[in-house]
Image (cartoon, grey):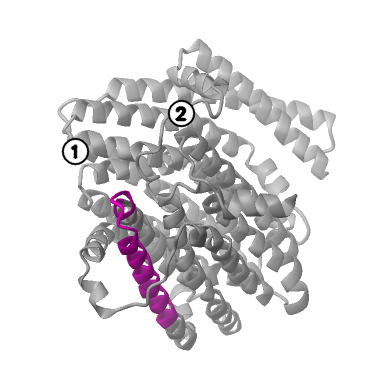
Amino acid sequence: MIREIINHRILNERPTQSVTAAAFIVAAAGIASRLLGLVRDRILASEFGAGDALDVYYAAFRIPDFIYNLLIIGALSAVFIPVFTGLISKGKEEESWKLASGILNIQALFMIVMAVFVFFFADKLIRLIAPGFPPEKMAETAFFTRIMFLSPIFLGISAIFGGVLVSFKKFLVYSLSSVMYNLGIIFGALVFVKFWGPIGLAWGVVLGAAAHMIIQYPTVKSSGFVFYPLRFHFFRNENVRSMLYLMVPRTLAIAVNQINLLIITIFASTLKSGSVAVFNLANNIQSAPLGILAIPFAVAVFPLLSACAAKQEYDDFVRRFSETLVKIFFFVIPASVFIFILRAQIVRVILGSGKFDWEDTILTFKILGFLAASLFAQAVIPLITRSFYALNNTKTPFFIALASEGVNILLVIILIPHYEVLGLAMAFSAASIVNALLLYFALRSKFRMFNDQQIISGFLKITLAAAGAGIIIQLSKMVVAQAVNIDTFLGIFTQLALAAFSGSVIFIFLCHQLKVEELGHFKNAITRRIFRNKEKITEDMGEAGGI
């Protein structure tokens, strides 16, 4: 039975022709991956607590993650899909496989060269990104980095495989790859660590990256993949030049975000042990609703915005942008209120076990509270940035991101002496809000007419409903605390679940009373049969997703 499913449903996956079906597959796998990510963090926190081991683990992530996001998932794989899909749609299969093979060769060769460089110079690189670590901790971080830099080699190849699968509309295996990545890390934490100690975490990352690649290869092969050795005339190929041209703005935009993560690590390393760990753990929790609720909207509407801009249908552009922006508000504003009020319960349920003690819990939920305050701003940045891209304007988001990063660094310098790691969270949130506001007003200035009334009205109604729900959540917390023992996992989970449920009911009720249009759209979406929509996929899905 299992072998039949693997052979017929996975290895020989048929193209998905329904937009709704494809979106459902990607969304379901995305949610599963996010949940596994939280399970992963619980295991890490339980096994090691917020101390030197997790500081080393997260700091060692920075260099491999920087290279991977900057040059592979952020730029290369994103621009590979439209070029590759264009060749396939024109029946130029041999040329398309030569392109895929060439890109695979280039990125694999580049990543191997980078791995050799990191192997010899890891000590010096770690001194730059974790200058506050003592010598022993710095040496251990360099050792972790050398091992973990194997992962971008596998992930780089896997990103191209993913682009191929998306181009052929084979979303099941593509979506499962991120699940395999987290399973690999979990296996490392549960098994490798028992035999090799903390370094088993680094090998778990490598295992997850290898699994991310391996699970996709059979389906790519069955799609007709033919490998061609790299030839020097490949660089004169028109398709390659087109890809390199498209990569530049993507690389610049993503570079700022990656630099922000490096700066956080640099400053956190100068603080007490565990500061790098608790910030990353809190950030992982607040990132979950961004990945599930906000980014999918931005990715989904991007082709429509691009089409409107290309046809100079700017009224439709503004309408689609405004509708999507309010939809993001509808999901993210209540999520931010829920996370802020229930931050202690969330951290205790997800992380509060084993060596993750009460002091670690308090610090983590305090950081989570500050991060949640800017969740609405973080959620709209991907949409507004893509709106500029649709208008063929890549410079404005880049310069605004640079300005926002300047605000972040300035605030960190001011706040960190007084608030330590909490100052990092305050600065991060403030810079995110500045970034979102600058992007919004810059985009607004591009149009003669803008739907300010619709956006402001939707924002205020949703915020009012979320505030009402927040009051009920707080009251529910107090009532449940009198009825259950909140010193146990079951008790705190019950408090979290009942408070969140009561808040959700009140939020929906208040949205109905306030006539929030997005509630009607949401009700229609969930009552519609999942695969009823027979609309065919005529464009690529936008981006090859990352981890």
Looking at the rendering, the stretch of residues picked out in magenta corresponds to: 86-114
Q: Could you say which is closer to the camera, residue 336 or residue 201?
A: 201
Tell me if residue 310 comes above or below residue 393 in the rendering. Answer: above
- Tell whether position 69 is magenta: no
Is residue 177 in sight in this rendering?
yes
Residue 12 horizontal/vertical position (percent): 56, 52
Q: Residues within 10 Å of mark 2 (few under 14, many from 20)?
A: few
Residue 294 horizontal/vertical position (percent): 46, 39
Q: Which residue is mark 1?
A: 310
Q: Could you say which is closer to the camera, residue 25 or residue 133?
A: 25
Q: Please tell me whether mark 1 sits on a helix, a strand or a loop.
A: helix
Is residue 380 in sight in this rendering?
no
| Disc 2 versus disc 1: nearer the observer | 2
For badge 2, the amino acid type reads: Lys
Q: Which residue is mark 2?
A: 534
Left or right, 151 with respect to 318, comes to right
